[in-house]
Image: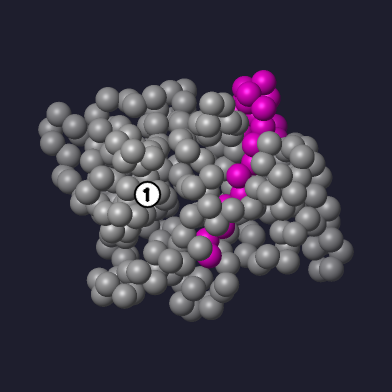
Amino acid sequence: MDSKPKKNIRDYFRSNPRFLIPAYQRGYKWGVCGTDGSSAAKSLVIDIKKAFEADKRDEYFIQGVTGYKKDDIFYLIDGQQRTTTLFLLIALLADKHLRTELLFDDKGNELRLIYFGKRNTSAIYLEKLCRHGIIHTPTATQDTQDVHFLYKAAKEMESQLPTAPDERQKLLDNILDKVFIFQIEVSAQEAPNVFSMMNGNKADMKIEELIKAQYLSGLTRIEDTKSVQETENVKSTLRNCLKLELKKCYRA
């Protein structure tokens, strides 16, 4: 178990040799446009830019990911949408050297994100985009639902990226070094129950789970996260989140 789950995005990628999205996960959805016409991927870029440009923040949190490690592979139970979107975003901003370092294995051959167990056309499309940093329009044979939304997410994010090289580099540095994520690790034995809890009937979620979700979605400052940087397991993380949320209630 990782005793320090708080990681910036650079550390998140470097500390996990491989990521795997299990085949039972739903497809990629962050390219789907909502009622406001924006996708979650586009909104993420807009929020990050605003955080560092308008709000002048030193840190920005993008919720957490949950999974378990086995044979140096981090199996994603929750957070596959965020992780896939980060692969796309880094691919669009980074140069060839950094793309290879962060997105591919030590030999530079295999994409470090094992996409649904290398699910045919979608895995091939994602690897090509990450390899070259270029958004290719899907061909007729490629245009599956996953590929379509990977393409849409990449195009939506690209529309929000600065064109000047120095501004692109500044944004990339902020994303890698000042955007943070919580990597919560459970045992392989706990994984089925955790997945069921996070993806089952949301109305049946316990109050601690709701508080955890609300807490992680609203994190913006380091002082609110000190007591959850070192936790033994999911239960202790939830307890600390609950304590912090109760403190906020009393202060209010």
Is residue 177 in view from this perspective? Answer: yes
Q: What residue type is labelled 1?
A: Glu
Quarter of the picture holding the C terminus: bottom right
Q: Give the range drawn in magenta.
A: 178-205
Find residue 123 and report its horizontal and vertical position in percent: 30, 32
Determine which quarter of the picture holds residue 57.
bottom right
Q: Where is residue 185 in the image (x, y as percent from the top left)?
A: 64, 36
Does residue 234 appear to the left or right of 188 in the view shown?
right
Q: Is residue 103 above or below residue 250?
A: above
Say whether residue 59 is magenta. Answer: no
Depth order, front residue of 52/109: 109
Instruction: Count the labels in the image.
Output: 1
- Who's the residue at 53% across and 52% down the image? 11
On the rendered image, what quadrant is the N terminus found in? top right
| Colour convention of the picture | one colour
Q: Mark 1 points at which residue?
A: 101
Image coordinates for residue 224, horizontal then vertical, percent:
73, 63
Q: From the viewer's perspective, is 217 left or right of 173?
A: right
Name the residue nearer the viewer: 124 or 81: 124
Left or right, 22 with respect to 227, comes to left
The quadrant holding residue 113 is top left
220 up-or-down from 12: above or below: below
SS for dot 1:
helix
Image position, residue 106 (x, y; %) = 38, 40
